[in-house]
Amino acid sequence: MSALRTVAVGGATPYRIDIGPDLLEDGAALAAHARGRHVLLLSDSHVAPLYAARVEAALRAARPELKIATHVMPAGEAHKTLASFGEVIESLAALGATRDATVYALGGGVVGDLAGFAAACWMRGVDCVQLPTTLLSMVDSSVGGKTAVDIPQGKNLVGAFHPPRAVIADTAALRTLPARELRAGLAEVIKYGAIRDPLFFQWLEAEREALLAGDDRALTEAIARSCEHKAGIVERDPLEKGERALLNLGHTFGHAIEAEQGYSGAGRDALVHGEAVAVGMVLAARLSAMLGMAPEADTERLRALLLAYGLPVDVPAGLAPQALLERMRLDKKNLAGRLRLVLWRGIGKAEVVPDVDEARVLEVLAG
């Protein structure tokens, strides 16, 4: 069994990321992060039947005086909305949650984003403990305190920065993760190699079989190394004023694809977040090569690695380049109405590029 790994996130609001198996059974560790007696456990219709009862039981065993309510939302990005946010706020009100209440986010990125945003807004901010159950949320959305909901015009346009009190990543939860979701999470892992760590990228090329097979050792290592990279960046740039934007390699393209497809609401052929990011990273690499910034060989190496992990690398059929560009114009990184994209100089050398020529972006989107 994999040993517990811990990653410290510093800065103005430091916290710890614990990574290892069976952490959702450790009631003392879970309850240690609840400052008051009110707890709202937020989960979704996929994860709650698997883990909610055991998390609640573990919390009650450690702290019998806790007043715990469970809120189960429908699963999927299509439900990361202002309406769902309002329902979580109503659950906090029904619980009588005070300013020392704690929201526990048990699920993937949608649950984590929604729980964090509700915690940021309830009484102007209560604690949120992230209990990510997907690989993507373990290495990305649970860490760093970016919380948000989607609106029809775009993804994550309404939100707040609200760092968690703690992140507890139980790798045993990945054993119940569908293969597609595991692969989608690995896209975000690959991103860390692409933006800043060529040796990690090389390790991911070598460890593909172990990671896809769900090997505990390989997954724990991948999660820890990804979290170490993100923790360092978040500590230096907590509000995404500079370096932190590099974490969005592929995301401006990917978010546009997700929004245009209706956040996986357009049927089973719609890409999930990690898949859209995989496509977006290839588009960003192609644009970088087109602009003379990076060697085409690195684009092909990235494309080959994503394909080897079973991830998509092309814009889905039926999406109009002009419509995707319109979505990209709403991206939060843009300044003065000009596209500002994360591109690269090759593997491990990402950078933010202002004022990108929209004609070249359209050319890449058109394939």
Image (tube, rainbow, N blue to C red):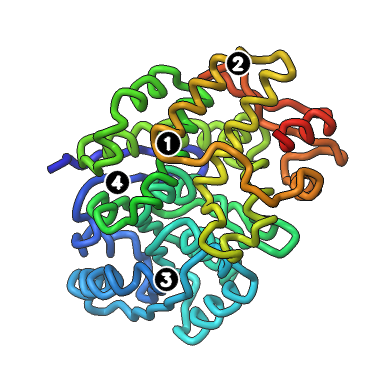
- The answer to whether one can see residue 305 in this image is yes
Between marks 4 and 3, how big is the CA–CA gap?
22 Å
Q: Nearer the viewer, mark 1 or mark 2?
A: 2
Is the residue under label 2 in contact with that under label 3 (CB below 8 Å)? no
Q: Would you call the spot at circle 3 few (<14 residues within 10 Å), some (14-19), or many (20 or more)?
A: many
Residue that mark 4 sits on = 18
Residue that mark 3 sits on = 44
Q: Would you call the spot at circle 2 few (<14 residues within 10 Å), some (14-19), or many (20 or more)?
A: some
Of helix, strand and loop, which one carries label 2? Answer: helix
Q: Earlier in the sequence, mark 3 or mark 2?
A: 3
Is the residue under label 3 in contact with that under label 4 (CB below 8 Å)? no
Percent position of residue 196, x then y:
50, 23
Where is residue 197, by image quadrant? Answer: top left
Of helix, strand and loop, which one carries label 4? Answer: strand
Between marks 3 and 2, how big is the CA–CA gap?
42 Å
- 355 on left or right of 61: right
Q: Which dot marks residue 189?
A: 1
- The answer to whether one can see residue 355 in this image is no
Of helix, strand and loop, which one carries label 3? Answer: strand
Callout 2 amino acid? Glu
The foreground one among 230 and 183 is: 183
Where is residue 40, by image quadrant? Answer: bottom left
Is the residue under label 3 in contact with that under label 1 (CB below 8 Å)? no
Q: Would you call the spot at circle 4 few (<14 residues within 10 Å), some (14-19), or many (20 or more)?
A: many
The foreground one among 222 and 68 is: 222
Q: Nearer the viewer, mark 3 or mark 2?
A: 2
Callout 3 amino acid? Asp
Q: Looking at this rendering, what residue extends furthest in the left direction?
A: 1
Callout 4 amino acid? Asp
Q: Earlier in the sequence, mark 4 or mark 1?
A: 4
